[in-house]
Image (cartoon, helix red, strand yellow):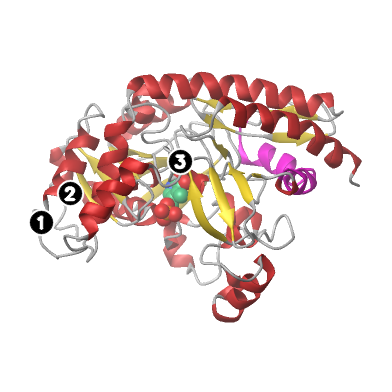
């Protein structure tokens, strides 16, 4: 590939707003020019200048096996030659739906869509249609995609851009969305259709559910007849083989998936019991559809990923991330800063501070840490040394199954240097 990161980003900015198709990629919150990726292999990506980075972005969690896994590439080659979309049922969507429902107790049916945004938006519509109620409860700092009703207090990219929500969203669209602080079980009433939660909050850096939070939501939903929706777009098939339900022992009424289940292609899914899903068209009155839903390429890649990753892979990934988290925290502290590296399964957060602190339990606490200015120099010092973290303090680190022990140890060594650089920055 010819050209530099700068020349490609200049060209991008001429024809794409801000040069990006998703705002966090723009480097706005860390400054500088984004690297433009031409290829990826395993734990690594390569930019247009030929620079190779150890990649902890991993498409924000879409990639669990690492990039361009040979078996996924092989099924895609096979699928692409047979035609890529038909507008008719295909075996691939049945196989992926069986693979997903077969791994999660109580999840009887799913409908496939093309993104996490669509999955959550559709699940909320279904919850409203099934209960005949309007109100939705979401939690401050949780991201559920960019549909109008769910953009309020959205964490992640919304927080990085310093926006409370989004222009272009009417008061009416968010009028039925109630925002509560994470880790607080707010009392509900019988106007609430559903409580929507990230079982582990992964879009305000990492905020773990405190013991009893998810179970408390379950109890409170049952008390008033509201549905509990787990947004498992990140946690699904990453936290454990059966996702958050298996990990925390709490069963929602509706599940939303995305990222991992597409094997790197655009897929989302939402599901629950057969009785609930029967409210969807063509069986019921809740309309939902998609030209590319259940796309043959995406379902082939997603099913292959789920097939490859076994229970023992989750166990070993969790163990490796636990040790990496401890060493990463020690590395930062050895450079004179304070750090918290909270984990939940293989999900890993990173907070830096000049003062001693506890891992945050809600968005207000996370925000103070994410906005203290230390992440930016730390990020750039790592990037200069070939380690690509997410370009924003509100994101988590994604360790894939392709990250080797050497990759992780090298990252820990570089983190000492990067933390020194951050400590020295004003
Ligand atoms: C990424 C994400 C979404 C949105 O998924 P897209 O595929 O980007 O539309 C929804 N919920 C959570 C928890 C996410 O992390």
The Cα atoms of the two marked residues, 2 and 1, are separated by 8 Å
> Which quadrant of the structure image shows residue 350?
top right
- Pointer 3: what residue? 66
Q: Please tell me which of labels 3 and 2 falls first in the chain.
A: 3
Residue 156 has which mark?
none
Residue 89 has which mark?
1
Query: How dense is the environment of label 2, judged by Cα within 10 Å: few (below 14), some, or many (20 and up)?
Result: many
Can residue 363 be found in the magenta stretch?
Answer: yes
Is ligand 1 within 8 Å of the beta carbon of the residue shown at mark 2?
no
Q: Where is residue 347 in the image (x, y as percent from the top left)?
A: 52, 31
Q: Which of 63 and 218 is in front in this view?
A: 63
The Cα atoms of the two marked residues, 3 and 2, are separated by 23 Å
Contact, mark 2 vs mark 1 (Cβ under 8 Å): yes
Element under label 1?
Answer: loop
Q: Position of residue 372 (x, y in %)?
A: 79, 44
Q: Which of 358 and 215 is in front in this view?
A: 358
Res 191 visible:
no
Region rendered in magenta? 361-382
- Which dot, 3 or 1, sits closer to the camera? 3
Horizontally, is 182 left or right of 424 in the view? left
At x 68% / y 33%, what residue is drawn? 411
- Pointer 2: what residue? 93
The Cα atoms of the two marked residues, 3 and 1, are separated by 30 Å
Query: How dense is the environment of label 3, judged by Cα within 10 Å: few (below 14), some, or many (20 and up)?
Result: many
Element under label 3?
Answer: loop
Q: Please tell me which of labels 3 and 1 falls first in the chain.
A: 3
Can residue 374 be found in the magenta stretch?
Answer: yes
Q: Where is residue 174 in the image (x, y as percent from the top left)?
A: 46, 60
**What secondary structure predominates along the stretch shown in magenta?**
helix
């Amino acid at each position: 590939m010819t050209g530099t990161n700068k020349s490609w980003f200049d060209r991008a900015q001429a024809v794409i707003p801000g040069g990006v198709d998703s705002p966090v990629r723009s480097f706005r919150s860390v400054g500088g020019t984004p690297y433009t990726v031409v290829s990826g292999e395993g734990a690594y990506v390569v930019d247009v200048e030929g620079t190779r980075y150890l990649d902890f972005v991993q498409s924000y969690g879409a990639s669990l096996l690492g990039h361009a896994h040979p078996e996924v590439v092989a099924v895609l080659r096979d699928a692409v030659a047979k035609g890529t979309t038909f507008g008719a049922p295909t075996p691939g969507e049945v196989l992926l739906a069986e693979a997903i429902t077969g791994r999660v107790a109580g999840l009887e049916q799913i409908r496939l869509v093309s993104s996490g945004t669509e999955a959550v938006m559709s699940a909320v519509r279904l919850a409203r249609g099934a209960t005949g109620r309007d109100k939705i409860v979401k939690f401050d700092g949780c991201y559920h995609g960019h549909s109008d009703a769910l953009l309020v207090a959205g964490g992640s990219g919304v927080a990085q851009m310093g926006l409370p929500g989004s222009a272009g969203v009417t008061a009416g669209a968010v009028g039925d969305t109630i925002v509560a602080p994470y880790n607080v079980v707010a009392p509900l009433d019988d106007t609430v259709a559903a409580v929507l939660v990230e079982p582990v909050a992964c879009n305000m850096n990492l905020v773990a559910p405190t013991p009893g939070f998810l179970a408390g939501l379950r109890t409170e939903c049952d008390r008033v007849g509201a549905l509990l929706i787990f947004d498992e777009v990140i946690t699904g098939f990453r936290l454990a083989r059966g996702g958050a339900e298996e990990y925390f022992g709490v069963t929602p009424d509706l599940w939303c998936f995305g990222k991992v289940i597409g094997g790197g292609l655009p897929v989302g899914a939402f599901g629950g019991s057969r009785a609930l899903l029967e409210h969807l068209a063509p069986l019921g009155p809740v309309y939902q559809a998609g030209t590319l839903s259940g796309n043959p390429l995406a379902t082939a890649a997603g099913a292959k990923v789920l097939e490859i990753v076994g229970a023992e892979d989750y166990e070993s990934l969790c163990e490796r991330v636990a040790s990496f988290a401890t060493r990463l925290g020690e590395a930062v502290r050895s450079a004179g800063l304070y750090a918290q590296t909270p984990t939940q399964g293989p999900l890993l957060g990173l907070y830096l501070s000049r003062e001693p602190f506890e891992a945050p339990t809600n968005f207000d606490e996370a925000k103070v840490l994410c906005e203290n200015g230390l992440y930016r120099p730390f990020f750039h010092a790592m990037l200069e040394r070939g380690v690509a973290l997410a370009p924003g303090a509100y994101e988590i680190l994604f360790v894939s199954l392709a990250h080797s022990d050497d990759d992780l140890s090298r990252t820990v060594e570089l983190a000492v240097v990067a933390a020194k650089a951050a400590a020295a920055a004003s």
